[in-house]
């Protein structure tokens, strides 16, 4: 392709792809926020002494980890309306992606907490801290740095999973690529460009996660 | 020296922080849902026609298949044979505007049933199997089949039967599309049929050597061959498909929910008075629909029974 060819190609396709990227980022940000809340709730719930918290948390994690995200999307979008609940496409996407990532996130939270040495609990008790206080002040601050690397993984995974949402009428990046392709059949350059866009976004997310990791561990190092 | 440079190149901490906040705020403003983006939940129940008249628009499902129903990427307008005809009919029914909901072809019927939109305007063929799921208007066109093959048609494929009788030849079809049923009816084994998510993928599949031919409607094939630069061609001459002694043609129509019989009937009445008029011809001519593709007196009821006689 000549330079003019490349420019013409970008002029034809880039505005639409940027709109698609917008939807992809909406899903990623919304899904990640939901996943964060749910991971903490379900991760702590799975360790709770009360079975009324433990069982629902276990059921949630196993159901969402154990079924296909694509089928979950179809089910929430096409089947749920028959039960009288009809969410808009964007909300369906955020909810399903958030619930799906949250199930993996809950395992990250649970295992990080389990990896804090037992002695820390005992020490907290010796200082007369209650269970909640011990969790908030002693255990979670130590578990957090352990959660971050796998959480970064999940975030990238979430970004890429947003492509599934094209199947429920949302025009995110992948779907926009398909639409543009249908108009011009520029298959190879279009998919190449889309790959590069995904890669660029995931790199930005990774840099952000690494900064966060650095901040958290530096903070901890300063206190130790 | 390097230390000094570093110090000078860096903005004061407060400015850097302000820059980050500004970037994040801009990003958030860009991503924030615009009016209407969070709407689009399903709407069912009540009289559909009254509801869309009150709303002033009707949501129609389409699968982005030119020339039937597609988005013109230059203008962003939903266009094609089916949406343009829908606009004309709905205006006479007192509904000013149509809004497209884009979905995969195979998801059109589930999405219609789930109330994601109220009409399928994708030039969908009327078939008995589909009639068990949804209602159809009377057809708006009738056309035959075509194959996309590599330039020179190396396997000499001139119809479904040729492909069946050619050792190792494989056929690409689109998910949910009629051609899968044609291929099976002719006796092409499932192992030699590959299903693609959409027509451009199937055409790319032929170009990349994944399948020997792509089977689509004559108009889809013409449209895609006009766009691609890959060494492909339409298989000519093409032997029309005959099943049970009958030449198979596809009759395209609008789809409605089974509970929307009144709505369908109201639409159909206007549609029948429109199809075949000079105004209709003028409307669909730019999409390659000519007079010989008019459906004649064939009705949805006949096609649902499984014959056009």
Image (cartoon, rainbow, N blue to C red):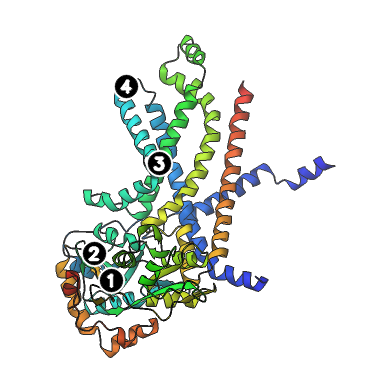
State the SS at label 1: strand
Task: From the image, tell me which residue sits under label 3.
Answer: A100
Q: CA distance from mark 4 to mark 2?
A: 51 Å
Label 4 and label 2 in one chain: no
Q: Residue furthest bottom?
A: B278
Q: CA distance from mark 3 to mark 1?
A: 37 Å
- Work out which quarter of the rendered image holds the N terminus of chain A and state it: bottom right
Task: From the image, tell me which residue sits under label 2.
Answer: B130
- Work out which quarter of the rendered image holds the C terminus of chain A and state it: top right
**1 and 2 marks in contact (CB < 8 Å):** yes
Label 3 and label 1 in one chain: no
- Eye-nearest disc, 4 or 2: 2
State the SS at label 3: helix
Chain letter of disc 4 in the image? A
- Of residues B223 and B163, which is closer to you in this image? B163
**1 and 4 marks in contact (CB < 8 Å):** no
Chain letter of disc 2 in the image? B
Q: Residue B253: give x, y in percent of width and height.
A: 26, 73
Task: From the image, tell me which residue sits under label 4.
Answer: A50
Q: Residues within 10 Å of mark 3 (few under 14, many from 20)?
A: many
Q: Residue A130: give x, y in percent of width and height.
A: 42, 16
Task: From the image, tell me which residue sits under label 1.
Answer: B125
Point 39% across, 32% down: residue: A41
Q: CA distance from mark 1 to mark 4?
A: 57 Å
Q: CA distance from mark 1 to mark 2?
A: 9 Å
Q: Which mark is residue A148?
A: none
State the SS at label 2: helix
């Amino acid at each position: 392709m000549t330079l003019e060819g490349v420019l013409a190609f970008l002029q034809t396709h880039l505005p639409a792809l940027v709109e698609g990227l917008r939807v992809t980022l909406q899903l990623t940000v919304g899904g990640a926020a939901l996943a964060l809340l749910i991971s903490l709730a379900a991760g702590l719930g799975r360790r709770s002494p009360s079975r009324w918290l433990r069982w629902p948390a276990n059921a949630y994690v196993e159901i969402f980890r154990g079924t296909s995200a694509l089928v979950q999307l179809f089910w929430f979008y096409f089947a749920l309306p028959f039960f009288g609940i009809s969410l808009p496409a964007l909300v369906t996407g955020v909810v399903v992606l958030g619930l799906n990532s949250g199930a993996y996130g809950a395992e990250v939270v649970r295992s990080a907490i389990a990896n804090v040495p037992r002695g820390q609990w005992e020490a907290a008790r010796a200082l007369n801290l209650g269970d909640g206080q011990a969790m908030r002040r002693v255990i979670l601050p130590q578990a957090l740095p352990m959660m971050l690397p796998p959480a970064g993984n999940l975030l990238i995974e979430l970004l890429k999973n947003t492509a599934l949402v094209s199947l429920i009428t949302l025009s995110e990046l992948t779907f926009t690529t398909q639409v543009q392709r249908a108009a011009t059949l520029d298959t190879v350059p279009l998919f190449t460009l889309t790959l590069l866009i995904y890669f660029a976004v995931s790199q930005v997310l990774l840099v952000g996660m690494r900064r966060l990791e650095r901040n958290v561990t530096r903070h901890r190092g300063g206190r130790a | 020296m390097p230390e000094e440079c570093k110090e000078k190149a860096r903005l004061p901490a407060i400015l850097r922080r302000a820059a980050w906040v500004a970037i994040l705020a801009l990003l958030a403003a860009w991503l924030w849902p615009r009016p209407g983006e969070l709407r689009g939940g399903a709407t069912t129940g009540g009289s559909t026609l009254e509801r869309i008249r009150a709303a002033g628009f009707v949501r129609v499902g389409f699968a982005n298949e030119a020339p039937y129903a597609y988005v013109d990427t230059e203008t962003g307008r939903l266009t094609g044979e089916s949406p343009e005809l829908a606009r004309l009919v709905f205006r006479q029914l007192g509904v000013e505007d149509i809004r497209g909901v884009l979905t995969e072809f195979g998801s059109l019927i589930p999405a219609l049933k789930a109330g994601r939109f109220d009409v399928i305007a994708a030039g969908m063929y009327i078939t008995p199997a589909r009639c068990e799921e949804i209602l159809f208007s009377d057809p708006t066109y009738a056309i035959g089949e075509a194959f996309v093959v590599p330039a020179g048609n190396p396997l000499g494929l001139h119809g479904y039967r040729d492909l069946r009788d050619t050792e190792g030849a494989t056929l690409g079809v689109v998910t949910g599309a009629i051609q899968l049923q044609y291929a099976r009816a002719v006796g092409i084994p499932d192992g030699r049929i590959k299903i693609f998510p959409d027509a451009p993928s199937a055409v790319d599949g032929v170009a990349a050597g994944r399948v020997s031919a792509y089977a689509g409607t004559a108009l889809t094939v013409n449209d895609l061959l006009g766009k691609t630069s890959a060494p492909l061609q339409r298989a000519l001459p093409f032997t029309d498909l005959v099943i049970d002694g009958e030449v198979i043609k596809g009759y395209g129509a609008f789809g409605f929910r089974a509970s929307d019989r009144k709505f369908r009937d109201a639409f159909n009445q206007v549609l029948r008075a429109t199809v075949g008029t000079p105004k209709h011809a003028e409307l669909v001519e730019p999409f390659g629909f000519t007079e010989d593709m008019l459906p004649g007196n064939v009705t949805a009821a006949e096609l649902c029974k499984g014959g056009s006689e």
